């Protein structure tokens, strides 16, 4: 039996525009993109592939937000999206374990292989990871996963 190679995908996600703007306005605010992640005018790009399950995607790259003389330090790495019936989570690797950053409902799969979700909100863990400036359930940026 020949193993199939997972199709390449790209996650387009801005996390939350107000958070990105806040970090950029800090006198010492820095946003680093590393290990394959890219920054665009619309947010961040994370390269990846479909996981072993049909509606699971794994992404590479790191986006690091820092500022406030070192007291602000948020690193999003090894993002993973899992969904079923249009609902799911966006997870990130934090201190060696995956935690749910955000959850979504109403994701739509397009004929071109894209997956988009507009109703994305931060989880309890996601709100804490971003420093508690947002309440759980606060709106996060929409995302799109597309084949490459």
Image (spheres, grey):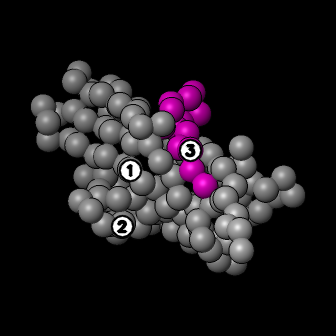
The residue positioned 55% from the left and 39% from the top of the image is 45
Q: Is residue 65 magenta?
A: no
C-alpha span from label 3 to label 1: 11 Å
Q: Taking the image as drawn, is residue 84 in sight?
A: yes
Callout 1 secondary element: strand
Residue under label 2: 99
Question: In which quadrant will I find the C terminus?
Answer: top right
C-alpha span from label 3 to label 2: 19 Å
Q: Nearer the viewer, residue 48 or 86?
A: 48
Is 45 situated above or below 97? above
Q: Is residue 17 left or right of residue 75?
A: right
Residue under label 3: 47
Few, some or many residues within 10 Å of mark 3 (<14, 14–19, 20+)? many
Few, some or many residues within 10 Å of mark 1 (<14, 14–19, 20+)? many
Q: Is residue 46 magenta?
A: yes
The answer to whether mark 3 and mark 1 are in CB contact below 8 A is no
């Amino acid at each position: 039996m020949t193993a199939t190679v997972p199709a390449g995908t790209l996650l387009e996600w801005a996390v939350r525009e107000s958070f990105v703007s806040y970090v950029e306005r800090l006198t010492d605010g820095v946003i680093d993109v590393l290990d394959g992640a890219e920054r665009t005018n619309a947010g961040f790009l994370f390269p990846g592939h479909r996981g072993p399950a049909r509606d699971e995607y794994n992404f590479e790259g790191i986006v690091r937000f820092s500022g406030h003389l070192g007291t602000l330090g948020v690193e999003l790495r090894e993002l993973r999206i899992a969904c079923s019936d249009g609902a799911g989570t966006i997870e990130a690797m934090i201190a060696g374990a995956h935690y749910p950053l955000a959850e979504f409902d109403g994701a739509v799969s397009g004929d071109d292989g894209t997956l988009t979700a507009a109703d994305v909100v931060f989880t309890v863990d996601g709100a804490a990871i971003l420093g508690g400036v947002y309440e759980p359930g606060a709106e996060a940026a929409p995302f799109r996963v597309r084949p490459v």
